[in-house]
Amino acid sequence: MAKYLFLSSLTQEALQGTLKEGGTARRETIRKATEGLGGRLEAYYYAFGDRDVYAIAELPDNVAAVAASMAMSTAGAAKTTTVILITPEEMDGVGKKNFQAHVPPRG
């Protein structure tokens, strides 16, 4: 399964809900939603700054990741950016791909 980083900026309403329900309740909601997509929530953190929530999840594929991101956005609770995470082992394989053979010459 692939890993994804979800960076979310919560709306004022979502922040108020988090304060009312508690941070662990919100994390549990996200955990259940992730499992419903066939994945696993690996990490969930609140933070200061431009982003309020950083979550890492393992999901079966990009379709599941888009479904998760769109569900958060369409609920109106957060603006979310999704980042596909690459393991060091996957990066090892990048150098073995012959990308240059498919790039047209310059000039």
Image: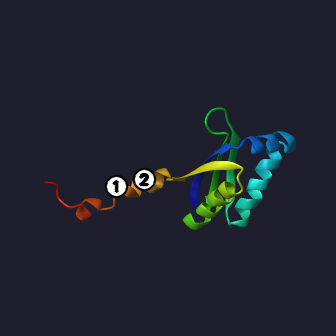
Relative vertical location of residue 8 with respect to residue 75 in this rendering, above or below: above
Image position of 91 (left or right of 15): left
Relative vertical location of residue 61 with respect to residue 7 in this rendering, above or below: below
For the point 61% across and 65% down, the residue is 64
The numbered mark at residue 72 is none
Q: Position of residue 12 (x, y in %)?
A: 74, 40
User: Residue 102 sits in which quadrant?
Assistant: bottom left
Local packing at callout 2 (Cα closer than 10 Å; few below 14, some 14-19, many 20+) is few
Q: CA distance from mark 2 to mark 1?
A: 7 Å
Q: Is residue 18 visible?
A: yes
Total count of labels: 2
Q: Nearer the viewer, residue 68 or 36?
A: 68
Image position of 62 (left or right of 102): right
Q: Are marks 2 and 1 in contact (CB under 8 Å)?
A: yes
Q: Which residue is mark 2?
A: 91
Q: Position of residue 91 (x, y in %)?
A: 42, 53
Q: Nearer the viewer, residue 75 or 67?
A: 75
Q: Which residue is mark 1?
A: 95
Q: Position of residue 54 (x, y in %)?
A: 64, 44
For the point 69% across and 41% down, the residue is 45
Q: Secondary structure at mark 2?
A: helix
For the point 82% across and 39% down, the residue is 19
The kind of residue on which mark 1 rests is Gly
Q: Secondary structure at mark 1?
A: loop
For the point 68% across and 66% down, the residue is 37
Name the quadrant of the N terminus: bottom right
Local packing at callout 1 (Cα closer than 10 Å; few below 14, some 14-19, many 20+) is few
Image position of 54 (left or right of 84): right
